[in-house]
Image (tube, grey):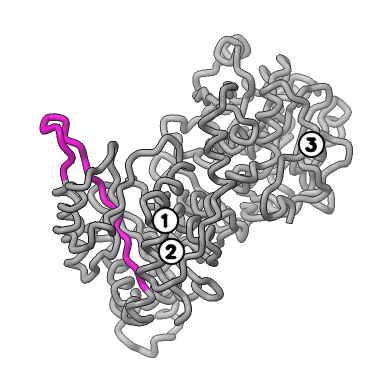
Amino acid sequence: MSGTKYIFVTGGVVSSIGKGTSAAALGMLLKSRGYRVVLQKFDPYINVDPGTMNPYQHGEVFVTEDGAETDLDLGHYERFLDENLGRLSNVTTGSVYWEVISRERRGDYLGATVQVIPHITNEIKARIGRLGREKDVVITEIGGTVGDIESQPFLEAIRQFRNDVGRKNVLYVHVSYVPYIEAAGELKTKPTQHSTQRLREMGISPDILICRADRPIGEEIRKKIALFGDVEVESVIPAEDAPTLYDIPLNLHGSGLDALVLEKLGLPAPPARLEEWRSLVRRMHGATREVRVAVIGKYIRLQDAYLSVVEALRHAGGAHEVRVELDWVDSEQISGPESARERLRGADGVLVLHGFGQRGIEGKIEAARYARESGTPYLGLCLGMQIAVIEFARNVAGLEMANSTEFDEETPHPVIDIMPDQVGVEMGGTMRLGSYPCRLRPGTLAAGVYGAEVVHERHRHRYEVNNAYREVLEEAGMVFSGTSPDGRLVEIAELRDHPFFIGSQFHPEFRSRPLRPHPLFYGFVGACLGEVPRVAAPASGEEEAR
């Protein structure tokens, strides 16, 4: 571990101030200077992972290539780094205690009294160290806010870690909030002072302070924060609100964050290669055209529940130099064909989101019907593909009352079902998680959009298209243009004689990147513009199909 540098990012005052995006942006900036960087998130909740948590409680569950269900911040990490991460990048209190208790039950501790210190903190430190192998820099974000009781073992572990690997190899970055008080007409530094003081009480003196605010932070405010935070003025990095997420790395670079980090870690500072990123931001800001996409879901009150979808649409919009305006539609508010026409009329595209459970399903089915009948471009994600299959089976293939057994166990036509060899297996055994290969049928819309024969995509679902109905659906005009290599599982369904109608059993949004928009989103936004999407998305960096 001695050759690796470690950066720990903590947060104070309030949650959701941008620790994750700050960490991701810093990682991207260091990578742009030629360093091998990996990011990690410590979440203090007792859940082993966020897979069973309500989206309204925790937002999106981001799935990695290796099938880990993780915090949504890992999506930011992957998008900014343009690299795949794995299960080691998401550590929860629950997973740490699970491992330590399992070892205790096996007798691994040889009868010792198992305690938070050293056993829990040692496990936390071990997970940091394992991630640092073959990397130049590890950036670890500590979830929650300094002062939370749940975060204390993680803070204690990173305090110890500096002594374990050498003080010159560790840097502490604290992200805080500087609120503007309207009545006083000024920014207030006291919350940041208290937050920094609380961190020092835990034995951690921050080396750099990133100060979030909704307006510019002047030199006098920086000097005051530096005085009470016990850092140099140059180490107080202003971070005012940005127009888009993708402005943040450029803003932090302009404030000197990456140069300062390298200086404090004693690392060389080769020039940052940010030309492509600057070009992306210019395209996003300079877009003059606009498309409106109706996004159909049931957790629309918290858009973080679909964060990767939102960002994937932005990536595609940036590549097309168009603003993608999202019209969020609660599927429970669509009650029938006329309701769908009234609500969705005028949309340039319809996107039906993923999800679990029966609530809002019929509204999603009516949205898919509207897109099919009106010729409006359609993209269905995971459940959104299954919805398209159900709608087509009912209204085109003549399979009245067709449904998924997830929603109606007594349906006469279970066009979506659990595979026969999965029946009776517990929930965890039936969930398809992580990356699986998909073979594309030549000459189909999907093959044209991807420009490839085989692609790898990430899954998070339990039910599949029922093979017993594939023939009748294909005879009626549905094309199963992507399948597992053995042909057993349907991965992509599309329609003939439609400008763009595709549903994917997988989650393409998890693999979309700012400089490499996912082909399905790129094609979908292009179709919303009236373009004929018969070519793959422009590539930059690693190949889309690996």
Crowdedness near tag 3: few (<14), some (14–19) or many (≥20) residues, C-alpha within 10 Å: some
Among the 4 quarters of the image, the one containing residue 426? bottom right
Near-viewer residue (541 or 545):
541
Q: Position of residue 137 (x, y in %)?
A: 47, 68
135 vs 50: above or below: below
For the C terminus, give its image quadrant: bottom right
Secondary structure under badge 3?
loop
Secondary structure under badge 2?
strand
Image point 40% across, 49% down: which residue?
A: 254
Instruction: Report the amino acid beneath label 1.
Output: Ala
Image point 87% across, 35% down: which residue?
A: 471
Instruction: Report the amino acid beneath label 3.
Output: Val
Q: Position of residue 391 (x, y in %)?
A: 70, 25
Q: Are discs 1 and 2 less than 8 Å apart at CB? A: yes
Task: Report the magenta residues as a range.
Answer: 170-188
Which residue bears the numbered disc 2? 139
Which residue bears the numbered disc 1? 23
- Which badge, 2 or 3, is on the more N-terminal residue? 2
